Image (cartoon, rainbow, N blue to C red):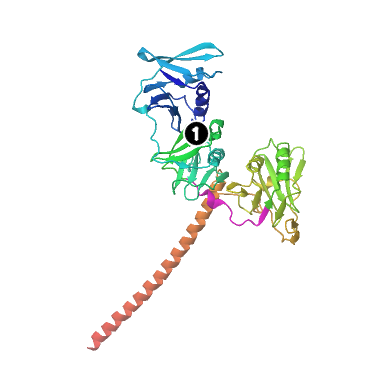
Amino acid sequence: MIAIPHGLCRAFPALARKCVSGGPAPAVVFEAKGGTRTVWVETDDAALAYTAPTEGSDEVLVAPMAMLEAAAGPGGEPVELCVGSKLKGEDRWSERGVPKSHPFEAILPGKQHRPPDAPEAWHAVPIAFLAALHECGRPAAKDAGRFSLTRVQLRGKAGQVVATDGRTALLRGGFSLPFTEDVLAPALPVFGTRELVGERAVRLGRTTTHLIVAAGSWRVFLPIDKTGRYPDVAGVVPRNAPTTVAIDDRDAAELIEKLSGLPGGEADHRPVALAVDSGFVVRAGEEKSEKICEVRLRHSTANGPGVRAVIDRRVLGRALALGCRTVRLTPDKPVVFERKDTTLLTVALDPALAVGPKPDTNPTITNTRNNKETAVKSETNGHPPNGRHDPPDADSPLLAEELRAALGDALTAAGRLVAALKHQKKEKKALTQVWSSMKALNLGRGGQS
């Protein structure tokens, strides 16, 4: 017989569902060994384990997940798992003083029911690491393609967790990781559950096949993707943005409150226009009714040329919820939202979706921090005149940015190679002429003699 806490019958199936991308529920392994009870389950996406001290003899039991779900009702007393002859099992518990039981068919334990190897050493990480895995897992793509965008990337040397769906990307940094290379792992929603977030002791370990995240008694085994390719998301972030906005917390709170009520929320991509024009304004409208609403961020400051960019309002809302208060706008580059150790960037939508007046061609943007007014030169809205972008991969504009940069490097290298070949050709021609002259000179001497 193996006894487990009643609350585990509720928590374990809920967390296990967040470790599986789909398909039938896997079997659950219950093992009591050396005074430790381990409950674990493994899928193609991850393995989930719960460990706690226990009493009694060593024993292994394998049962369907439905057995736990049957006992997931209210109650605080332990649930007893018993298996008789011919693998006929029964779990027993008490619910509000009333004895309950549920029969199940146990599974014969085998080598496949051994848990993954534990790491040789653990590395302590802050609780924020769980939030980084959770938040970065949200923008990850749902379907795999040329790049492994269904994964999150852990950049060991940079101490970052990165994820992208090809249009929006999130980078969370400031971590010390126990490896230096970049590692790909599944993007899972399990790291946002209250069971894991409520733990204080968070550790990270690694084996040759898995990354292991431990939070209290819970462990999540993430299989390492050794063959997948991932774009250089950090390389896409514009380094020097000509226009920067600092959003005041009061304005951020007001914008969060009003964002969902702005018109155009039912349109594709839910566009809103970010306009730097004698300050910072967020505008949205409906094409049918020609209704336009704007939220002017009166306490925020803007520096740089007047510009306008259109983005998905859901990205804007998420950036504000993450605490990003700095906006960086660069023509023909992704829009960047930042806070300490957090960068959210997104590809701008078609500028034709913008509503309201265009930015002033010669605006005066006031920096309230130093109380100076600076006249700036006339600028376009940062997009081609025809209002269209034609990246090589229209479904993944961020990847197109990376491809464009790589193509530029390749063209530079090709130019150097062509120059080297021309130089080599000139040297070869010169050597040929010298050789011809030497031959002629030698023949001439031979004739005189």
Q: Residue furthest bottom?
A: 448
Quarter of the view holding residue 28: top left
Q: Nearer the viewer, residue 149 or 211?
A: 211
In the image, 60 versus 23, the foreground residue is 60
How would you classify the magenta stretch by its main secondary structure?
loop
Residue 164, horizontal then vertical, whole percent: 54, 43
Q: Position of residue 124 (x, y in %)?
A: 48, 42
Amino acid at pointer 1? Gly
Above-or-below relation of 96 to 302: above
Q: Quadrant of the N terminus?
A: top left
Q: Split into 4 quadrants, where in the image is the C terminus?
A: bottom left
In this rendering, does residue 186 appear at all? Answer: no
Q: Is residue 234 magenta?
A: yes
Tell me where residue 90 appears, x and y as whole percent. 44, 14
User: Could you say where residue 175 lies in the image, as x and y percent from the top left?
Assistant: 52, 46
- Residue visible at 30% across and 81% down? 440
Range covered by the magenta-colored residues: 230-244
Circle 1 sits on which residue? Answer: 216
Query: Which residue sits at x=32%, y=77%?
Result: 435
Rendered position, 80 above or below 361: above
Please state if 66 lies on the left or on the right of 131 as rendered: left
Judging from the image, what secondary structure is the residue with disc 1 in? loop
Using the image as rendered, state which of residue 202 and residue 409 is in the foreground.
Answer: 202
| Residue at 48% in and 18% down | 79
